[in-house]
Image (tube, helix red, strand yellow):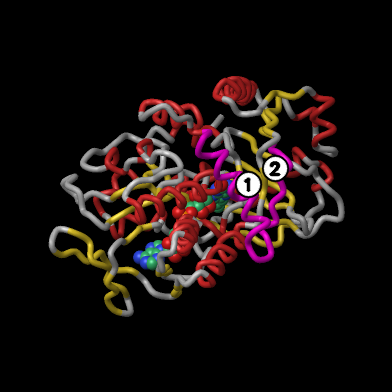
Amino acid sequence: MLGASAAYHLALAGMRPLVIEANAPAWGASGRNAGMALAGLGGHFDRVTRLVHASGTRSILDYTTRSLDMLEAWDAELPGGIEWDRFGSLDLAVDDVEEAHVRSMAALQADAGLEVRVVDRTELAELAPGLAIDQVRAAKWTPGDAKLNPFRLCYGLLERVRVLGGTVVTGVRVDRLLAGGGRVTGVATSHGEVASGSVLLATNAWTPSLAPHLAANLTPIRETVCVTEMLPFSIGAPGFETNQCNEYWRQMRSGEVVIGGFAVADEGMGIGSYSTRVRSSIPPLLARLLERLHPALSDARIIRCWAGLLDFASLEIPMAGPLPAEDGTPLPGAYVAAGLTGHGHPYAPVLGLLMAELIVSGAPSTLPLAPFDPGRYIGVVHAPTWLEPFLGS
Ligand SMILES: Cc1cc2nc3c(=O)[nH]c(=O)nc-3n(C[C@H](O)[C@H](O)[C@H](O)COP(=O)(O)OP(=O)(O)OC[C@H]3O[C@@H](n4cnc5c(N)ncnc54)[C@H](O)[C@@H]3O)c2cc1C
């Protein structure tokens, strides 16, 4: 979705981008996610907010809410739309620790300007009929959040890229960057060399294979998603999260419920793995969570499971901007946008736009990219700050 967003904006600006995809569009995390669009970034909000403030006058919400607005516009603009349902999200606390987290996060996010509040039981019952209210200690309501079909998003953007004169090739793997005369000149691929004035790596968890100097600060984490059979009733219009957004679920327009999470119960907590094989221990945990919070789902069958790779940036804030060489010196023509740390939808639209502006004009015009400077991840190994929110309660 990040490469597709950047290519779309490059094409709109009159460039003729070439998207080189090793597999197929949405083969990576962008086609394996649960389709939630959360402006508040789950458990990462606090630390990302501090890093963005330290880089200038902007708030992280300037970026994430802009992405959600862009997604809404794309729903009208892209062929077939993206099944955009801006019905809000509910962050459910099921124990004391989560309640404290939900309340402090609601205060932090409201203070930063997000429309968010803790709702009482009566309102919760109205927002999510059938929810086991007795299991919920507190609930944070973010009315501007949304859900979408991530396949439609990727394919819709790439279809527009083609119409605007760009090219999308699939089944072609980029093996390395080509450089000469102190700048990047193109890429070597499984199908030969391609010359280019600029190369943007939007390769998520696989970025270290092309830029090994980012490996120490970019960690793949396997996460599992399950989908139920179609249900003939609604479990509530909003998207749902719990445990600092480590578990999350939504009902699709067609009636199936998609639920993901419990990476922490995976082998080695799924950390550092490039395998997307589903471990059999995870689906029962996801099923039990659904049954506990939506008793009407106790007989619902899970019909499909898959796993995908999150890419966690060590400091939780993505990297998007010029890609320096290993020793930190500039490498003109090289760019990277990766490390969305589990929140593709609030980041990919706006970062794709800003990367396109940077490539076309030498500087982004809509918002500064300074908070996402990849330089903060070069030549230094940061101990990951994401472990605490990842462990949840
Ligand atoms: C299980 C799961 C659930 C998630 N749930 C949500 C959610 O509900 N909401 C949300 O906002 N985010 C969610 N995310 C995170 C979100 O999906 C990601 O942040 C986002 O998709 C990353 O987009 P991307 O374009 O950077 O990466 P990807 O979608 O992974 O795309 C990278 C692409 O690069 C290609 N590639 C890799 N190496 C090469 C190469 N050498 N040459 C050519 N091509 C290459 C891959 O084939 C892939 O298609 C979830 C992620 C997972 C895994």
Residue 264 or residue 49, whichever sits in front: 49
Q: CA distance from mark 2 to mark 1?
A: 7 Å
Q: Is residue 75 magenta?
A: yes
Three-letter amino acid code of the residue under disc 2? Gly
Secondary structure under the numbered disc 2 in the rendered image: strand
| Quadrant where the C terminus is found in the figure | top right
Residue, far bottom: 191
Q: Residue at x 79, y 30 (%)?
A: 124
> Is 179 displayed left or right of 160 in the figure?
left
Q: Picture coordinates of residue 368 (x, y %)?
A: 40, 38
- Circle 1 sits on which residue? 36
Residue 216 or residue 105, whichever sits in front: 105
Height in image: 333 above or below 327?
A: below
Q: Is residue 143 magenta?
A: no
> Is 216 displayed left or right of 16 in the figure?
left
Q: Residue at x 67, y 60 (%)?
A: 81
Q: Residue at x 51, y 67 (%)?
A: 161
**Which region of the structure is painted magenta?**
61-89
Pointer 2 local density, CA inside 10 Å: few below 14, some 14–19, many at least 20: many
Q: Is mark 1 within 8 Å of ligand 1?
A: yes
* Residue 239: numbered disc: 2
Q: Is residue 223 visible?
A: no
Q: Picture coordinates of residue 335 (x, y %)?
A: 32, 54
Q: Is residue 330 visible?
A: yes
Secondary structure under the numbered disc 1 in the rendered image: strand
Q: Earlier in the sequence, mark 2 or mark 1?
A: 1
* Residue 56: numbered disc: none
Q: Is mark 2 within 8 Å of ligand 1?
A: yes
Callouts 2 and 1 close, C-beta under 8 Å: yes
